[in-house]
Structure formats: C-alpha cells, structure tokens
Image: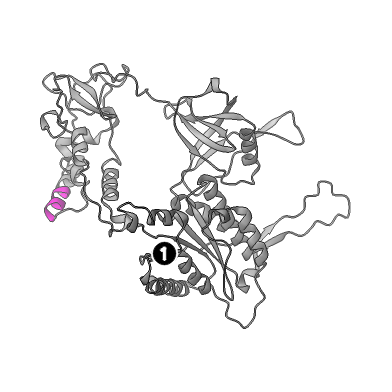
C-alpha cells in the first residue's frame, strides 16, 4: 500500500502551545469612525489554534481531491494520547474532526506533570498497525498477493523543540517505538514497516505553518498547482463595475492561466477534452476563490487561456462543475491523433521540415505509428518492422528509444519503493530526455558531433570510468583551445529546407 493511504497527525497539546503565536490579526471592521473613536486592539491566535487550523486545511485538500482511499487520523498528546477518530470511512470528514477537537479544548495550564508528545508517537505506532477496510479486503482476498500488502504510513507531528539535538532524540525514540511495536505484533500479520525516513521543517506559527503544510501536500500526494488570474468580481460599493484580483506569488511551482469569457456548460457546447482532474482551491476563504467557486457551482463554466511562447494566447483549459465537484478539463490544442501522420519530406502540416533524423543517399522518411507512439521510418520499410534492426534505426531518436527500451522482469517485493526497477527506468528516461530537441533548428550542440562526440553520450551515464573522464576533459580542452584561437565551429549541411540552426 502507498504511504498516502494512511496519514496520522500528532498534535502537541502541551501547555506551551497555549501561548500566543504573536501573529496579529486586525479585529476592527467598523466603517464609520467618529471623533473620539477608540479602535479595537488586534488579536492573535494561540500556537494550538494555528496548528489545528493548518492540519484541518491539509485534510480539506486531501478529502476534496480524494473522496476515497486517503485516510487521516488525529492524535492529541499532552498527559496522555487521545485519538480523535479511527480508520473508519464514517469518521473521515471535517465535521467529525472539528467536533472531537472542540471536546479537547485549549491546552492545559503548566503543571508539574508528565506533558510530552511521546505519548502521541506511541499511539501513532499502534494506530499504524490497525488495518483499514481496504487493507483488510486485500489481505483476505484469494489472490496470490494477498499476503504481500505493505503497511506504510505517514506521521506528521506538529510540535516545538528546543534544538536539533531534541529533534534527533525524538526521531530515535520513534524508531525504537516502531521496533518494539513490531516485536509485539510478531505473532500477527499486522506488522509495521521498520524503514523510517524523517524530515524536519522549522517554521513560525501563523500563516507560515499553514503555508508549509500546503507546500508539503504537493509532494505528499503528487499534486499540481494552477493559478487562475484575471477573475472579475463585482465591488460592493460599485456593483456596476468589476475589478481583477490576482493572487500573490506562491513558493511552489504553479501554472498560470487567465480567465476567459465564461460559457454555459450545456451539452451543445461540450469541448474536446483529453484529460480531466478534480480540483480544490488552495485558499478556500479568499475572495477570488469564493467568487470563482460560486460561479462554477451555479452551472456555468470558464474557459482558461494560456500564453504562447511566440506571442498571443490560446484557450487550453476549461473549468466546470459536475455533481457539486469542480474539475479542470484539458482541451485539445495540438494535431488530432486521428489525422494521418505527415511525410517528413512534406513537413508536419508543411511547417516543420528539420526533424533530427539522418538523411543520406536520397532516402525519404515518414512518420510511423506503432502502438500509439510516433516513430520515423523509411518509405521502403518492410511490414515486419523490427526495432532491433539497426538498418532502420536513426542516429539520434533511434538510439534514445533503444537505450530506454523496457524488458519484463519479476518484481522483488523486498525492495524499497525507491529502488524498484520501474523507478530506476523512469529516472533513466528522465535523465536522457532533460534536453532532447526534436528539430535541428532547436539545437546547436547536437549539430557539432564532430567536435563534441562522445561527450553527450557519456554525460547520460550514471558513472564514468577514469578513461571516460579523461576523454571528456580532452573534448572540453579542445573546445577551449578553438575558442582561444577564434576558430569557428562548422555545422554540417543537414539537407533540409527548414531554418538553419539558431
């Protein structure tokens, strides 16, 4: 099971969390101020309130995007550990968590007693051992993998510590708790993973804590961010006009799209979509988010436009609500997959004619579709096309395909997730395609093979031998020498009628 399936929040409820966070909030909303008016003093939330709000917001995003399969438990730690909910789907909602937190109350006053977050860590390890309904269903199934369900979990502890040594001590304590818990559960099938990885994030209470959790949730659940700008909203003092409210910058990567003319979401106006994803606002209480969400829930849709690199804009996405949930739809902006692939001699739609293929001896190349993937092939290609036949491989694209060819192998379940063959293959493909121009005019480096080979090939390796390191240095020294002599680097004529290299 993925670690995303089970998440446990351990909230520090010790007396220290009852102090002020010193994050001031203006509490004066009076519009008219006469003479002698005394404004209300700003207020500040406690550390406990800030941690609860940040954790609740984390859950809201998770449960909005994943209505099923992503479970979160809350444990409060002070004199002892108190569990606020179970893995039952009936208790996986905001209302239940808020009601349970209300019964807990504010942190107690300082006393000479055993207040500690360690009680919560012990309870988290015990909760980790408990099976969820999905895990129980897989364990009791009659398949061959029934006994191989991995029990992973993510534990998020919101607490305070004096220094790094205190944090390291807590990590060691939790590691020992996991080991002891596995000894207790050795007679059952409810073992906990003994592999512990930890991260420490130090932030101030208030908005920074909520912002940090919003940032972490992106990596925890592999989420993407889209920022909608140019949202028109009616002003209260002037309802006949509207103003655009753009959100401030975020500290994580986001794709910026602009509000376009809204449309009605009727069946006659359905768009050709290639993907659809459930979305939720990052800041649900902000005025722009409220305006956009209410607009979509009223039955209308919004087209979003994306700026082009060459200038201009194009409509690329659609926002619409279905059954009370909001989705972003990716619209088709490229050539349809139903169209016949163009000949390389004619160019893609008569525009692109300088693909990175080897053209020699007057051979003519075409696009070949194999299992939905586009390849280049000769006109004389025989029907029984063999990917291992080097006669039909091309120097650049073909070698990239061959170096990243997948072979079926039996998975070893004792391997960790980071070490699986699939992840290693993905990492290799990512390394090979970080910079891989499709056309000749989009690259200069790959047109200088007589000067830089085999440096581009050696750079893709995970490790280099001493001889390969020397070879790389010789190529770099040669280029430096040509630069000092002001010798130009001659690019070969590629025999294409497209633009030359930039």
Query: Label 1, on which residue?
Result: 198
Tell me if residue 471 is in the magenta stretch.
yes
Q: Is residue 45 visible?
A: yes
Up/down of 499 relative to 447, above or below: above
Q: Residue at x 18, y 36 (%)?
A: 399
Tell me if residue 488 is in the magenta stretch.
no
Check the picture and name the quadrant holding the N terminus. Answer: bottom left
| Element at label 1 | loop
Crowd around label 1: few <14 · some 14–19 · many ≥20 (10 Å) = few
Residue 384: quarter of image: top left
Check the picture and name the quadrant holding the C terminus. Answer: top left
Rendered location of residue 427, percent (x, y)? 29, 48
Q: Residue at x 26, y 47 (%)?
A: 425
**Part of the protein shown in magenta:** 466-473
Rendered location of residue 360, percent (x, y)? 13, 23
Residue most toward the right?
35
Residue 419: quarter of image: bottom left
Up/down of 218 relative to 403, above or below: below
Q: Is residue 162 visible?
A: no
Specify whether 324 is left or right of 462: right
Up/down of 386 relative to 117, above or below: above
Q: Nearer the viewer, residue 37 or 23?
A: 23
Residue 43: quarter of image: bottom right
């Amino acid at each position: 099971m993925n670690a995303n399936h089970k998440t446990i929040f351990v909230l520090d409820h010790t007396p220290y969390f009852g102090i002020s966070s010193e994050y001031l909030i203006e509490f004066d909303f009076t519009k008219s101020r006469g003479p002698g008016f005394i404004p209300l003093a700003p207020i500040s939330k406690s550390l406990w309130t800030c941690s609860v709000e940040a954790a609740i917001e984390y859950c809201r995003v998770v449960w909005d995007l994943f209505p099923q399969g992503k479970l979160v438990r809350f444990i409060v730690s002070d004199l002892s550990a108190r569990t606020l909910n179970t893995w039952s789907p009936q208790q996986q909602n905001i209302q239940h968590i808020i009601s349970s937190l209300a019964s807990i109350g504010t942190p107690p006053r300082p006393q000479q007693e055993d207040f500690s977050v360690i009680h919560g860590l012990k309870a988290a390890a015990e909760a980790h051992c408990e099976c969820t309904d999905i895990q129980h269903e897989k364990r009791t199934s009659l398949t061959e993998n029934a006994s191989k369900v991995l029990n992973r979990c993510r534990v998020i502890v919101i607490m305070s510590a004096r220094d790094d040594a205190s944090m390291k001590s807590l990590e060691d304590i939790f590691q020992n708790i996991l080991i002891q818990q596995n000894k207790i559960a050795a007679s059952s099938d409810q073992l906990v993973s003994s592999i512990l990885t930890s991260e420490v994030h130090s932030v101030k209470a208030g908005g920074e804590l909520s912002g940090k959790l919003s940032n972490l949730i992106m990596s925890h659940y592999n989420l993407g961010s889209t920022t909608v700008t140019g949202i028109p909203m009616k002003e209260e003092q002037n309802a006949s006009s509207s103003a655009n409210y753009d959100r401030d910058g975020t500290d994580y990567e986001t794709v910026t799209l602009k509000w376009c003319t809204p449309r009605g979401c009727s069946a006659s106006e359905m768009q050709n979509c290639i993907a659809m994803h459930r979305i939720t606002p990052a800041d649900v209480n902000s005025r722009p988010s409220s305006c956009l969400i209410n607009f979509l829930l009223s039955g209308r849709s919004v087209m979003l436009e994306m700026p082009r690199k060459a200038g201009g804009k194009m409509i690329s996405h659609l926002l619409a609500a279905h059954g009370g949930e909001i989705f972003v739809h990716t619209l088709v902006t490229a050539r349809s997959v139903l169209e016949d692939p163009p000949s390389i001699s004619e160019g893609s739609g008569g525009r692109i004619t300088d693909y990175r293929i080897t053209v020699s001896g007057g051979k003519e190349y075409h696009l070949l579709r194999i299992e939905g993937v586009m390849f280049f092939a000769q006109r004389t290609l025989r029907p029984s096309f063999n990917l291992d036949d080097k006669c039909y491989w091309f120097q650049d694209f073909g070698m990239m395909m061959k170096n990243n060819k997948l072979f079926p192998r039996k998975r070893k379940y004792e391997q960790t997730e980071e070490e699986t063959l699939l992840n290693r293959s993905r990492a290799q493909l990512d390394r090979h395609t970080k910079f891989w121009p499709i056309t000749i005019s989009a690259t200069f480096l790959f047109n200088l093979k007589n000067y830089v080979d085999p440096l581009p090939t050696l750079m893709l390796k995970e490790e280099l031998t001493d001889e390969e390191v020397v070879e790389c240095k010789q190529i770099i020294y040669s280029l430096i020498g040509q630069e000092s002599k002001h010798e130009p680097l001659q690019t070969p004529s590629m025999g294409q009628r497209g633009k030359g290299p930039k």
